[in-house]
Image: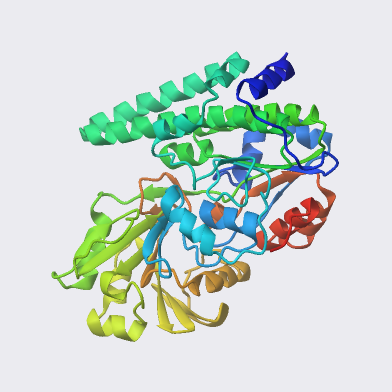
């Protein structure tokens, strides 16, 4: 019956099947946003992932892999699709070559960045991208961030004319409605406590778009499989958003995993009925680390303003403009979970070096590190040198390598050699701010987040750098056993599919 309905919808919407020969083996990549390896395993123990458990019994294997810094969707997807993730310091950043802010869910800004990017491949060439950040060559169906803005769900729905799909699975629809009701109720509760109508509208809009749009996207993915698309990518953001709001180990967060588990089972069953044979890979882009937000919403601005010790500068928190305000003395703070990019308006083209920064703002680093919420500050020492300064030590980087460690910059935290190498690579990014601030660890072991996060990422500490991959692809499994670094693992995925190199 389901196959008949999908065939009928293909005819109704005049959607043709892929022209890529059916003999070519296909690839389906499902990304579960923000789900760490440890929480994934825990969800199986809590019976929230019955289909995932079935796959493991069928011979699929689950492994952690290392995504490294910045533990961000924008960087992970770029590495998967293109084999390149340089100069992506978070989900939002100022691009010095484009002279504008770029944000992962703002189509206009991400288009230019993707166009200018130095790519090794376009994984989704002739295929489909659903709710990803980049189009990556997708021509069969492109519902990526370059085409959609999840902050504007009604704009998205004008393109998603498949609303009939929601009736194909009434049980799943009921769980979707349950999550919408719970999330909206929590939104009303939070906004009433803060007495903010603006926040209520924002929260309701976000809850509706991330749950309902995700459900529609799942059905569109099934339709794309019925069209025999050669390669399909879909990103489910449900868990990531719920874990931000309620915590990584919260009951509501686990409910979102159960819904994603159902989505994945439907896609798998549809794929098994297709004439094209598919590799089926489920992975996450990063994990999340338990966190606590700052005590006051204006705390971050106050920390930076006090460190500047110069009232002529206006400190402004932003998630990106198409072009920065023209006021001459602005300091732009771009939060990304547990890190903050700090850009000075006068040095957007050529960032400050440590000497010039300390000359203009004496003792700025010391003032920042005196705050309990700030754990580390990254700054440029020279054109090829960077310095990560902690409260009791520092690490010097040069040309993407660790040069020297002084004192105890991490004060007993489990930051291993691999994490340091990842930080060294990250420190070399041209698009980093004049300063990058990283959240400290509080006495309860929670990481300070610069957004309203109970679970966070965007840095280098804890489960955020330990996502998972679930696959039965032998070459990918062989590779991850040898080296679980993201770049190596993703190269094996592209190679096993036969993605064309650019």
Q: Residue at x 59, y 14 (%)?
A: 170
Residue 197 is left or right of residue 417, and the answer is left
Task: Name the image quarter holding residue 354.
Answer: bottom left
Relative depth, front residue between 351 and 451: 351
Q: Residue at x 53, y 32 (%)?
A: 214
Kindly give the residue lying farthest to the left in the view shown: 311
Relative depth, front residue between 447 and 471: 471
Up the image or down, 112 lies above or below 471; here it is: below
How far across and how far down the image is residue 42, in percent? 63, 38
Up the image or down, 384 lies above or below 107; here it is: below
Relative depth, front residue between 331 and 195: 331
Q: Residue at x 23, y 81 (%)?
A: 360
Kindly give the residue lying farthest to the front in the view shown: 14
Relative depth, front residue between 250 and 435: 435
Quadrant of the image for the N terminus? top right
Up the image or down, 44 lies above or below 366; here it is: above
Task: Name the image quarter holding residue 18.
Answer: top right
How far across and how far down the image is residue 115, in percent? 53, 60
How far across and how far down the image is residue 274, in percent? 79, 30
């Amino acid at each position: 019956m389901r196959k008949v309905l999908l065939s009928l919808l293909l005819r109704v919407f005049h959607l043709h099947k892929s022209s890529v020969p059916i003999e070519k083996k296909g690839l389906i990549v499902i990304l579960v946003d923000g789900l760490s390896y440890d929480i994934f395993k825990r969800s199986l123990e809590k019976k929230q992932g019955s289909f995932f458990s079935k796959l493991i019994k069928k011979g699929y294997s689950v492994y952690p892999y290392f995504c490294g810094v910045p533990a961000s969707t924008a960087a992970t997807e770029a590495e998967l699709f293109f084999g390149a993730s340089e100069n992506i310091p978070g989900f939002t950043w100022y691009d010095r070559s484009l002279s504008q802010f770029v944000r992962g869910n703002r189509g206009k800004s991400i288009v230019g960045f993707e166009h200018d990017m130095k790519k090794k491949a376009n994984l989704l060439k002739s295929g489909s991208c659903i709710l990803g950040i980049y189009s990556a060559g997708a021509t069969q169906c492109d519902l990526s961030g370059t085409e959609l803005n999840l902050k504007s769900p009604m704009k998205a729905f004008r393109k998603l004319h498949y609303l009939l799909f929601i009736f194909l699975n009434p049980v799943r629809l009921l769980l979707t409605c349950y999550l919408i009701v719970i999330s909206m109720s929590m939104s009303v509760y939070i906004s009433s406590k803060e007495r903010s109508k603006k926040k209520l509208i924002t929260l309701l809009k976000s809850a509706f778009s991330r749950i309902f749009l995700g459900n529609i996207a799942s059905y569109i993915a099934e339709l794309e499989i019925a069209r025999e698309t050669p390669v399909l990518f879909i990103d489910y953001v449900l868990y990531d958003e719920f874990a931000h709001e309620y915590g990584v180990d919260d009951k509501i967060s686990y409910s979102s995993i159960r819904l994603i588990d159902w989505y994945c089972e439907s896609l798998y069953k549809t794929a098994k009925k297709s004439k094209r044979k598919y590799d089926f890979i489920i992975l996450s882009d990063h994990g999340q680390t338990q966190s606590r937000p700052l005590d006051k919403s204006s705390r971050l601005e106050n920390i930076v303003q006090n460190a500047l010790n110069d009232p002529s500068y206006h400190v402004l928190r932003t998630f990106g403009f198409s072009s920065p305000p023209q006021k001459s003395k602005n300091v732009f703070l771009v939060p990304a979970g547990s890190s903050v990019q700090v850009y000075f308006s006068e040095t957007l083209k050529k960032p400050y070096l440590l000497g010039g920064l300390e000359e203009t703002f004496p003792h700025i680093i010391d003032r920042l590190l005196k705050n309990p919420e700030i754990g580390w500050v990254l700054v440029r020492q020279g054109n090829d040198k960077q310095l990560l300064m902690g409260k009791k030590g520092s690490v010097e980087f040069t040309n993407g390598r660790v040069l020297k460690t002084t004192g105890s910059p991490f004060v007993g935290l489990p930051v291993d050699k691999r994490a340091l190498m990842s930080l060294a690579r990250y420190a070399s990014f041209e698009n980093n701010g004049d300063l990058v601030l990283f959240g400290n660890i509080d006495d309860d072991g929670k990481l300070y987040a610069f957004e309203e996060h109970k679970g966070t990422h965007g840095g280098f500490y804890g489960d955020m750098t330990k996502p998972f991959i679930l696959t039965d692809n032998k070459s990918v499994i062989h590779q991850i056993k040898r080296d679980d670094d993201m770049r190596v693992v993703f190269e094996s995925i592209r190679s096993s599919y036969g993605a064309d190199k650019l």
